[in-house]
Image: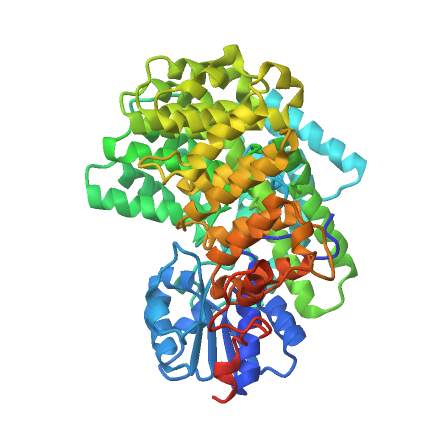
Amino acid sequence: MHDGHLPTVRTASGTFRSSRTLLAAGARLAAETNTPLTIVEARGLHSDVRAFVREVQPEAHSAVISAEEAALQSAGSINGVLAVHADVLRDADVRKPLLAMAHTADHLLVARHDYSDTTLDALATPGLVLRLRDPMPSAPRPAPITLTPPPMEMSVALRLVRPTGLPDQDLAAFDDMAEAQMRVDPAEVRQRIGELRSKYEATIELARQRRAATAPTDPSRTPRDHGCPSTGDLDRLTSEFDRWAQRESSSAGSVSAVPASIWIMKRSDDLLAGLDDIDWAALGHAYGSAEDVPGQLRAVCGLDEKARESALRSLFGNIFHQGTRYSASPYAVPFLTRIAVAGPVGARADALLLLTRLAVDWHDEYDLPLGIDTVAWRAAAISPEENLRWYDEQIAAETDGERLKNLCEGRAYCAAGHPVDAREGALRSYDAVRAQLPVLLELLDDQDPEIRTKTAYLLGWFPEEADATLLPLLACLDGERAPVCVATVLVSVGLIADHDPDSRLRNHLDHEHPLPRWAAATALTRLLVAHPATAPGLPPAERIAAELAAFGAGPASETATAHHAGDLHSYTVRSLLHLMGAAEDPDGVLLEIVRALPRIEETGVVPGPLAVCAENLLESLFDPANTAPVLAELSPGRRELLRVLAQLLTAADFQPVPFGSDLHERFTRYGLPGTRPALRAYVGLSTEGEDPSAALPDPWAQFRNH
């Protein structure tokens, strides 16, 4: 359940939880320099931010302002420490005043992702640009619940109102209402709507009053706070009741059907047929109302190349913002599918990429090498019904005024159809893309190899559709000459299959090109580990490991599949690590892993990939201990692993959070030296110019005498 905390409104990269790194660093710096701290954060998170700052640095003097308030600040009004996430610069109204604030702050602390705006980097205090990354879990992340995005009209009402923890008799009333809709009996529908409206008018009015009491001076200046519904959301709840109740003769015996099948849209001469049938203003994305999405989709289909590129950038940043999906996201999926299939040449590949991002995010390394676990995802997702029941329980018991206000706003946001649980919100888009797979399958025969490759990559993330997609993927191999497309198909087959169909994977171990050979070995590794019962029909683990080892020891391929952000050496290390349990000589496999480590290169998605790899290896190969193990008593593979890590890792890799990684903590957890010089001394390497007994440098030392 919720363990007493508010449900998460945004995914890992956008939640308050991931902001703690920025907040902790800012609070510490303010305390060290005895200056005030100003934090720019979404209004709905202000109380949580204040509580967290008080917890980590009670003596810090802090103020939390929203982006809209930051936009109203005069130049020079901020002194001390300013802590801000670079993505705030996306709002044009905020950008200029925020840059002026950044110039006058004594210390600027910036958090950003690798894809974020880097303008603030030049203004930040040296060493205080925090590159955020999601921690690498030891197990596959939870995966998605089949929840149709709320069709418009009556179906929206059913979903908006039913999930509120009603007694059994009221739930039965909802079921009756659904039946009435199916029978298309307007009179009965109006009766049910009237009954339900009377139940919820008080709740809606309370939420509206709470919202009005804290309304920003100029709401148009900034993206809407993710945790709070706009007044328009609340108005919509009552206006929909009014509109439905007034429909009588005009409906002519019908009740607002879903326009043009929002769920599966087949190809059409008009790529955007049905676009205006959707109430986009009632849906939301990262910056508030999604009323701008139709214009962006039209621009994607237009002839103006610059306008198309701008629209695609906007869509990648609003309906898919830092991995978060919103209520509008699944509604865009059918139109993006049409564009991918029959849109302008310059838009098709990008539309296909956006569909992939909406389905599975960009951090596919979470799910490799074993593939996405949709069963766990669906089980872990918290439904809107469950969230609303939780809100009702909390509201009934809450006595603090500010906390009650936040709870009421959060409940209204959830009741308006916006996703509250990040996993459930992502699952809506995942299932929306899943519903389009019958249309997208035809792209495996596309003339453009890039389209074929991107389609094959996408199909590998839908194991529940394996019966429908496996044969088309295998058919794609016949006559395919592009090595990267062949390799992508092979990996996708391995991710969704439970056997080696007709030995197609085994046969590709002898392919003339190294990339398909690597892909076949990668796919076979997944089958061997995830479906051990198939082992008698697969090549020996040693044969698979040898192919992976040969690829891992070589230079990066000129072309790579999209998996693991193209960092196939890290992917290879992951596969070999899983293969150790199936090999007769696991330590020999470990030595092959070690040989691949020098080939790992940084990508734009995972900062410090070698440090991440090291964390995973330590967790898998060592047991927690208070003292260092005797080096000579370790296996040859473990000794060589520590020696190579001591050679490759830098002092910066050991720097702890908030400015570094968890690597120091991981080494010390297993009794191993937690600094580069100490590790080098432990394995017998030179420490000239370094002190093995020295503690890690204090990242705050430069600020203590400010």
Measured along the vertical axis of the image, is residue 238 above or below residue 162?
A: below
Residue 277 pos. (x, y %): 41, 34
**Residue projecting furthest to the bottom:** 705
Near-viewer residue (557 or 426): 557
Quarter of the view holding residue 379: top right
Q: How many marks?
A: 0
Left or right of 399: which side holds 23? left
Near-viewer residue (504 or 552): 552
Residue 184 seen by the camera: yes
Measured along the vertical axis of the image, is residue 122 above or below residue 14?
A: below
The structure residue drawn at horizontal position 59% and vertical position 43%, both measured from the top left corner, is 423
Left or right of 335: which side holds 269? left
The structure residue drawn at horizontal position 53% and vertical position 30%, both measured from the top left corner, is 545
Residue 145 seen by the camera: no
Left or right of 544: which side holds 301? left
Near-viewer residue (590 or 602): 590
Residue 705 pos. (x, y %): 50, 89
Measured along the vertical axis of the image, is residue 385 above or below residue 681?
A: above
Residue 341 pos. (x, y %): 33, 25
The structure residue drawn at horizontal position 49% and vertical position 66%, both measured from the top left corner, is 651
Residue 113 pos. (x, y %): 43, 57
Q: How is the image coloured?
A: rainbow
**Residue projecting furthest to the left:** 304
